[in-house]
Image (cartoon, rainbow, N blue to C red):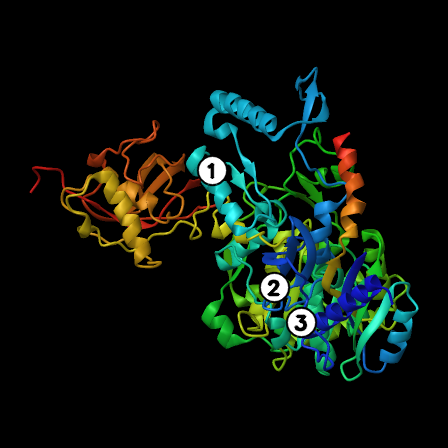
Amino acid sequence: MSPRSTRREFIKASLAAAAASTVGLPVPAGALPVFQEEGWSWDKGVCRFCGVGCGIRIATKDGRVKAVQGDPDNPVNRGLLCVKGYANAEILYGEDRLTRPLLRMKDGKFDKQGDFFPVSWEQAFDEMERQFRRVYGELGPTGVGIMGSGQYTVQEGYAAVKLLKAGWRSNNIDPNARHCMASAVAAFMQVFGIDEPSGNYDDIELTDTMVLWGANMAEMHPMLWARITDKRLATPDYRIINLTTFGNRCSDLADVEILFKPNTDLAIWNYIAREIVKTGAVDRDFVDKFCVFATGPYDIGFGMRPTDDFAGAAERDTQSREREVVLTREEAIAQGKDPGASHRVPQDNTNSAGKHWLLSYEQFEKALEPYTLDFVAELSKGDSEEPIDAYQEKLKQLADVYADRARKVVSFWTMGFNQHTRGTWVNEQAYMVHLLTGKQAKPGSGAFSLTGQPSACGTAPSSTSSAGVSPSGPIGSVSVNLTRLVGVEIADRAAAAIEIAFDAGAATELVGPLPADADFEAQAVLCLFIGERESGGWAVALQSIRIVDGQMEIRARETAPRGLATGGATYPADCVLIDRSALPVGQLPVTSTDTTSDEFIVDGVIDVPAPSGAP
Amino acid sequence: MRLSAILVVSTPQKLPQCSQELEALPGIEVYYSYPESGRIIAIQETQSVRAQEENLRQIQSLPSVLGAQLICYYHDADLDASTAGIERNLDS
């Protein structure tokens, strides 16, 4: 054996032994479980190629990657990696990899119509600076923006926000969570009031039923699928149901494969809910304690422009329904209308799709009535070869696992739901069924929106890389003992109030009384600032203040950080001073409703002092 | 030379078949078999990235295989020579 092949055999043996010990398999005595060569330096990171968030270890020597290993200490992937994890090394040396900036140029100068030419980093940064200054000079902070990535690390997202909001004083940043998961976010907000996926990967091991709704996890979230595979093989009673529009690799392991027609998953959820209601499987204690029933308008259009001037060929069919929808026979049945008649429904709520109102349980039950097994099976069956009886049997099994009180259930989905024509609705329906049966927010049970990229949400709430979102979520009110602020300048009071509020943890109400010498405007500004912490604060241009039913409504536009919270006293130019004489004296509650746009209203209580000289 | 250690998950019943199917693939060596849990640690040797990924897909699509994941991965110094050409292209 040549020395070279001896070394090769040695490396192979140590690779195999390291692999076995990484995944907890016994290694034969004498094998060396050490995966290390002289001069290697190991670092930790997170794989960015899907939404799982696997830990990886990378060995480098002389500035080049020498080896990659799943991080055995990482609770997500526990030492395993998939083919995408591999690529973390190879991608650095791939043939397509850009290793230097390319600039569009004509005659040696930047030109948008020119071709790409390699340039130095210095030249690239100079050109970016020139263009940035030009646009910023013309349009100011609103003229620049950042499209963030779901592959930002949290730290990178934080740096981007700091540059944009604190440096460029703009609010134009939106992360991946608003690009690919917008519908999931809207559903989180509608159902839970906060933009965060619920559930925990440990539910994979804690549950006994896994339902995949269009999520091809075997190929798209391989490491989570590896955990499901392990659990399924070790647990005879563990069941996997794979709902999908085409046969995929998850079906190899699934106990039941349900092939359905695209878009009919909404009907399937309603069928499940109907079965749960009919069979008395509703967890009344849970529902009474934690839930209300609500619904919203269905004439909401499709989020497209009213004309087809900008529509591409592929979207014209959807665009044509933007203003008016002619119901299909099935839609008429589902809405309790005569299926024989023609129903033209004007789309009146295209600008108010988030509107909602409460329902009684009886109204909820009645709305589910059309979604019988026969109706839904006929509507949703995706494989024309499959006998209807066999398909109905599968739908029954599906409803049974949700209805069975003895079973825990995890429902996983990804972009099959989120990038659906009715993505928000179908997300909400998943929560509906889990909440109805009390199978939510419990170990081993939950409706779980998997993300497509590892920091889709991490960068949004954690580093506030969204327009109009504060680090701690939607702006609310906090409890601050404002008497501690006596004798402090107005701007410093604002800063101090914020610090005190956050030192105290997330409190829920702004309480007075304000110091006697407090300026009323300072009080309003205080209210509007509360909720900010990390970025150094937002400047807020007050737009209107009015009294509605004894409550004060403050409307304000977030403009840019102006140093108010950090001690400066500069007010935005368009700040409206308040006419105190128009306000009733005493404590005034402040209402809050909307935090989704850049216009927002904040909760709190403001003391309106009596005008000086009054008794 | 690219070496990778792969965890292949099969079932205890299908493990012998799985071993045979793996050994029949070019560049694959079965290192350890675990009959009780239906698992195998295999070493894959390839020359190109494409072959590496293609082989893993082949393993995953074997009838006896439920899943296959990479655990460790190793580059030989030869890699530097193979990527030098890419850098030359960019320079030109």
- Quarter of the picture containing the C terminus of chain A is top left
Q: Counting other residues with Cα less than 10 Å from the Cα at mark 3, is it few (<14), some (14-19), or many (20 or more)?
A: many
The residues bearing labels 3 and 2 have C-alpha atoms spaced at a distance of 28 Å
Seen from the viewer's position, the closer of residues B58 and A149 is: B58
Pointer 2 chain: A
Kindly identify the residue that appears in the image at 51 percent across and 71 percent down.
Answer: A287
Residue assigned mark 2: A448
The amino acid marked with disc number 1 is Leu
Relative side of A15 to A47, left or right: right
The amino acid marked with disc number 3 is Thr
- Look at the image and tell me whether residue A576 can be seen: yes
Residue A66 coordinates in the image, percent (x, y): 70, 55
Of the image marks 1 and 3, the number of the one nearer the N terminus: 3
Q: Residue A22 carries which label?
A: 3
The residues bearing labels 1 and 2 have C-alpha atoms spaced at a distance of 33 Å
Which circle, 3 or 2, is nearer the viewer? 3
Vertically, is A596 above or below A7? above
Vertically, is A244 above or below A612? below
Numbered disc 3: secondary structure: helix
Co-location on one chain, circles 1 and 3: yes
Q: Counting other residues with Cα less than 10 Å from the Cα at mark 1, is it few (<14), some (14-19), or many (20 or more)?
A: some
Q: Which mark is residue A296?
A: none
Of the image marks 1 and 2, the number of the one nearer the N terminus: 1
Residue A301 coordinates in the image, percent (x, y): 64, 43
Which circle, 1 or 2, is nearer the viewer? 1
Residue assigned mark 1: A163
Numbered disc 2: secondary structure: strand
The residues bearing labels 1 and 3 have C-alpha atoms spaced at a distance of 40 Å
Q: Counting other residues with Cα less than 10 Å from the Cα at mark 2, is it few (<14), some (14-19), or many (20 or more)?
A: many
Co-location on one chain, circles 1 and 2: yes
Relative side of A29 to A500, left or right: right
Residue A579 coordinates in the image, percent (x, y): 23, 33
